[in-house]
Amino acid sequence: MVRMLLITTMMLIFELRIVKLSAMELLFEGDSNLQPIWDSDGVGISELQGEPVNLQKDEALEEFKETLGIRGNFKKDSYKGTPPQFMTELYNTITDSAGQTHSSSVGYFIFNVSGLDQNEFVLEAELHLYRQRSSPKSMPLSIKVYQVLQDKSLGVPDLHRLLNVHYVGAYASGWQVFNVKQAVLSWLSGIPNLGLLVSATTIFGDRVSINFSSRHDLPHEKQPILVLFNDDSVQVYPKQIVNHEKEDKVDNKQRAITDLEDV
């Protein structure tokens, strides 16, 4: 039997197993008002806030460096242990030589998929991002989603594995759905889950910032979500794949999205 499982406080049995995961970490850069904040587990999260970065950078960066096991101004002899390479790259991407945060046009997302069974058959995997309204000066954009690879700079998205590309209008807002199946399959096969990068460029190739709703924005229904269409049986055929439009027709009583605390 094929099942539908939502990661919530309840389990329901239907024709398809659908897993919805909220963003465990969200690091979105692309605005001069980038403010790093921290959750109760010490996991680094960044959000767009209304205060200038340089007013809050010191405390946030110290906690960020402590999480990475970094002391001082990030010199070679200042490690407390060895932080993961991709976390070191992440620190370098969002800070300058003085340890101050700076803006960029790269979004960084991590979803916790460790609770999934490696034997499950993934039919589809989708990254759902809600794009907020753009300024009047916006241009048509190309939005690209990458799987983060080891030993590659986070500041250069094209060094990573390109998963999906969307071309959107200058003033388009609402949900953007990206196919990230290959990334999820690789994570389930044992390749480290280093997250997803999202970058935006103009039709001329210039990097620009783009605003997506984050996990702490209201309403919560617009937070970043990873949706997995899985089948834990062996008798599955391509015709059983359910697309995004069909999912919307499922009765609301049969659907639930969990907050991170419930995962």
Image (cartoon, rainbow, N blue to C red):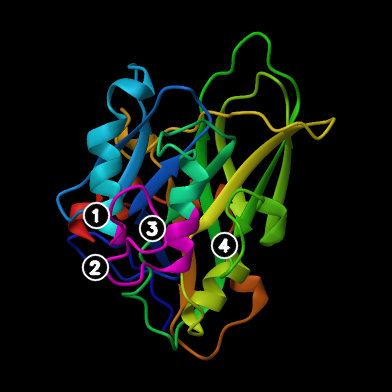
In the foreground, 27 or 128:
27
Of the residues shown, which amino acid type is indicated by label 1? Glu
Give me the disc on residue 20. Answer: 3
- Residue at (52, 30) in percent of width and height: 103
Residue named by callout 4: 148
Image x and y of residue 145, in percent = 63, 51
Asked whether disc 4 touches disc 2, contact meaning CB atoms under 8 Å apart, the reply is no
Would you name the residue on which mark 2 appears? Answer: 11
Mark 1 and mark 4 in contact? Answer it, CB < 8 Å. Answer: no
Q: Neighbour class for label 4 at 10 Å: few (<14), some, many (≥20)?
A: many
Q: CA distance from mark 1 to mark 2?
A: 38 Å
Query: In the current view of this chain or complex, which residue is farthest to the right?
Result: 204
In front here: 231 or 213?
A: 213
Extreme residue in the front direction: 77
* Marks 1 and 2, the one that precedes in the sequence: 2
Residue 196 in percent (x, y) is at 53, 56
Where, quadrant-wise, is the C terminus in this rendering?
bottom left
Secondary structure character of the magenta stretch overall = loop
Q: Amino acid at mark 3?
A: Lys
Mark toward the viewer: 3 or 2? 3
- Dot 1 or dot 3, earlier in sequence: 3
Tell me which numbered mark, 3 or 2, is placed earlier along the sequence. Answer: 2
